[in-house]
Image (cartoon, rainbow, N blue to C red):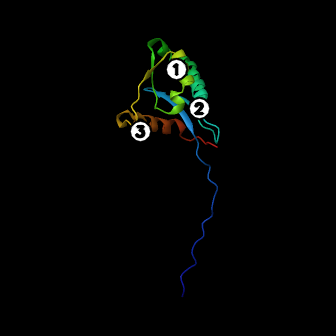
Amino acid sequence: MGSPPPKKFKVTVSAGKVAVMVFWDNQGVILTNYLPKGSTVRGEYYASELCQLKELLKIKRQGTLQHGVVLLQNNDPAHTAGIAMSAATECGYELLPHLPYSPDLALSDFYLFPKLKEHLHGRQHT
């Protein structure tokens, strides 16, 4: 006569957030690096990523460095840190100024995310 008892849901532990740093160009993803759990990007880490990107450009995009690389990055403190700016200059990158909160420069929404989904399809991240 009464209604059935309410269903109880099991609480499961979340995998948590996974932070990934992605470098890409008009041909696709060049470099993806997953940050260790609980870590944040600092200037030193970002500077090392820029150097790693340069080495990958030599392999994956032969001739790109000869023609010049224009780097568009947001105004994150790690990107604008002195050590990161120095690394970008040493790598020979031209830094394209990024206006804060500029929706017309949010290319990630239109290009990167679909390409990244394609790149990560079928992979398990723990």
Q: Earlier in the sequence, mark 3 or mark 2?
A: 2
Q: Secondary structure at mark 3?
A: helix
Q: Position of residue 96 (x, y in %)?
A: 42, 23
Mark 3 = which residue? 109
Give neighbour class at mark 1: few <14, some 14-19, many 20+ (Cα, 10 Å): many
Amino acid type of the residue tagged 3 in the rendering: Asp
Mark 2 = which residue? 42
Mark 1 = which residue? 88
Amino acid type of the residue tagged 2 in the rendering: Arg
Q: Which mark is residue 34?
A: none
Task: Determine the residue located farthest toward the bottom in the rendered image.
Answer: 1
Task: Determine the residue located farthest toward the top in the rendered image.
Answer: 66
In the foreground, 8 or 78: 78
Amino acid type of the residue tagged 1 in the rendering: Ala
Which residue does the image show at 37% across and 35% down from the upper left?
102
Q: Secondary structure at mark 2?
A: loop
Q: Position of residue 31 (x, y in %)?
A: 55, 28
In the foreground, 90 or 63: 90
